[in-house]
Image: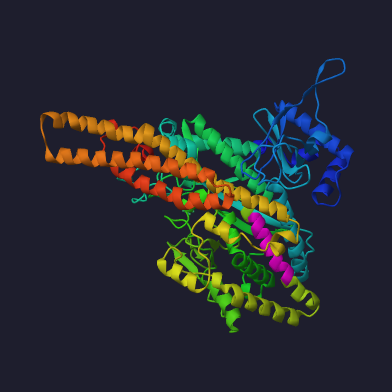
Amino acid sequence: MIENFGINSFNKKKMKEYLPYPIYLKWKDALRDEKNLDRETADAIAHAMKDWALKNGATHFAHWFLPLSGHTAKKHESFISRTSDNEPINRFSGKELIKGEPDASSFPSGGMRSTFEARGYTYWDLTANSFIIGDVLYIPTIFMSYNGEKLDKRGPLIDSTKALSEEGIKIVNMLNKETHAYRMRVKVGLEQEFFLIDKEIYNKRSDLKNIGRTIVGASSPKGQELSDHYFGQIPRRVDDFYTDVNKKLYALGIYSEAEHNEVAPNQFEMAILFENVNVAIDDNQLLMNILKETALEHDMVCLFHEKPFNGVNGSGKHNNYSITTNYGLNVFDPGDDPYHNNIFLIFTAALIEAVDKYQTLIRLHASSTSNDFRLGADEAPPAIVSVFLGSDLEKLFNSIRDGVEYKEENKRVFEGYNLLNVPKDSSDRNRTAAVAFTGNKFEFRMLGSSKTGSDLNITLNCAIADSLSRIYEEIRDLENDENKLREKIIEIVKDIMNNHGRVICDGDNYSDEWKVEAEKRGLPNHKTYFDALKALKDFDYSDIFLKRNIYTEKELKASYDVYLEEVVIYHTLEAKTLVDMIEKDITPAGIKEMRDLSKVLSFKNNKALSTKYDRIENRVEKLMAEEENLKTLLSHASEIKELQKRAEYVEKNIKTKLLEIRKVADDMETMISRDNLNLPTYEDIFNSLN
Ligand SMILES: NC(=O)CC[C@H](N)C(=O)O
């Protein structure tokens, strides 16, 4: 079985096998950024790739990219072509491998291009493996406009990793003389949470079909309170689904590390092993596609919305972040003696500074409008960004801040059940924090399940690079004076703790006390994605993005507009769906119930029944009136020209109106008999996989 691992991926091993050795070496040089690929090398690689792809059943190739919408995009192109003698032939040139030109006019560009400026180019990302799914060879690419503007997330992600590498390597090589590293790698492991529901049930609900979440629905008598789903027996149907998902991941060479039931009914998780960040993002996108597609094959639908159901947990995509040298030295590994581990101290301090300085950007880039329903509700971090270090490390950093001697606690050992003495972890897990240290990495828990991890990791890489570059300037002249260097490092960590230590929180981040404390510390609490967006309107991106050419002013302005559009589109879609559902499903159910009641009341007047009739009638009337109000709000919104104002209006009026309507609809649902309901209930959904 293991021989089949990665069978559909044109990985390093296959490159070696299929390419003439000098060509393979040239590819490796290009990979290390040492030389550009020349035309002959590109042609030779394309030829080998084509041979391999055809042998494995591919008939088409596709440049695969991540436009600003955050979804994946591709166009299948056939290998088949015609010779001058009119004979069919399979062709694939180096030029086709390296560069593609899809029509780019209909992708979001935040106004960077008009519709008539359709040209967009895709460029091969030679650091990521190409792979086959079905009969298509997928080539991971970077997407750019005719004028070189970045129209995707991969380009900036690669550039941000380079920036971090450039800054990090100087410090690591200064502090660790044992090996000379030539590159820092950002290693990311993404945990993907999702819901699975029965397809038939899904098809009966427009809200699930249009938005991926229920916008009405009274709670089920039983939700997650018995904690009987979490880590429990995986339903048979889902187990079979996992078997198929794993087969597909296996063939692509994706290391799926864990799968289990999550907390909420119908909620599950799959985690993929650490990879270089751009590959981790690819793998996550592939995983999401595979989960969706395989669910359908098993008559289920996979939901990635952050909060499909009220009253039970939502879904995140926890982003486990670490930085290593090309030799595998992990800068966040505290080792046995963290106090004297200069690399650990510097990089952890840089991360603390970065998270504090750029917390609003992190809040924004880990999120989306749909994530607003999750953050701060039922087992997801709140919207306030904080870092949990664990008690031992917090003591260490606090003692540096306070200039007092750090006394390491005796290593704790867990002695249990006569098995063996296991060293205890330095701290418990704190899942209430937005950012949690978990032994040798930081887990960014805010990221929403539907969102790509690119934006968040671009921000982290650049923010940490910025801190590291400042730190390097302070220590660079002390390389040959060990004592002075150590003193300086302690001074830097102390300063960072004094200036940015406010972001560290050891306690319960869900509590109201923390909200008050966070406010006292001056930490922003942007309750919504839109709030965070507004706060960034005049943000100075010089240090984080502009200086390093990660984004230009124009590109940043464009993404701001894309984000605003997303806010408007999201709520508008919800509102339109609700209008439709009131009309087609919700009020008709009330009317059916009234009809049944009126039949009884026509031959016998009964107080309780007539009260019930009145109550339903009242809800139906309210819903009909609210439906009209919603339509009016929608039409007002569409008349507002300025995007920011339109988003503001939609957030203030439409979003709140939807919540008001939901209350009425859910209340009415509880009064309607099973026979008369048109929509599957939460109870139906939560029991649909058994
Ligand atoms: N067990 C967990 O870690 C739950 C996480 C939670 N579902 C979230 O939204 O982030």
Q: In the image, is 106 to the left or to the right of 616?
A: right
Percent from the top left, x then y, of residue 319?
58, 54
- Front-most of residues 437 and 61: 61
Q: In the image, is 213 to the left or to the right of 459?
A: left
Looking at the image, the residue that sits furthest to the left is 604
Q: In the image, is 22 to the left or to the right of 386?
A: right
Q: Assign the N terminus to one quadrant of the image.
A: top right
Percent from the top left, x then y, of residue 263?
42, 50
Percent from the top left, x then y, of residue 382?
48, 60
Residue 34 inside the magenta-drawn segment: no
Which residue is painted at 53% across and 43% down in the image? 638
- Is 58 rendered above or below residue 5? above
Which residue is painted at 76% across and 58% down in the image? 183
Q: In the image, is 306 to the left or to the right of 616?
A: right
Is residue 195 among the parts visible in the rendering? no
Q: Assign the C terminus to one quadrant of the image.
A: top left
Which residue is painted at 45% across and 58% down in the image? 376
Looking at the image, the residue that sits furthest to the bottom is 404
- Is 315 rendered above or below residue 596? below
Range of residues picked out in magenta: 457-470
Percent from the top left, x then y, of residue 56?
71, 28
Dominant secondary structure of the residues highlighted in magenta in the image: helix
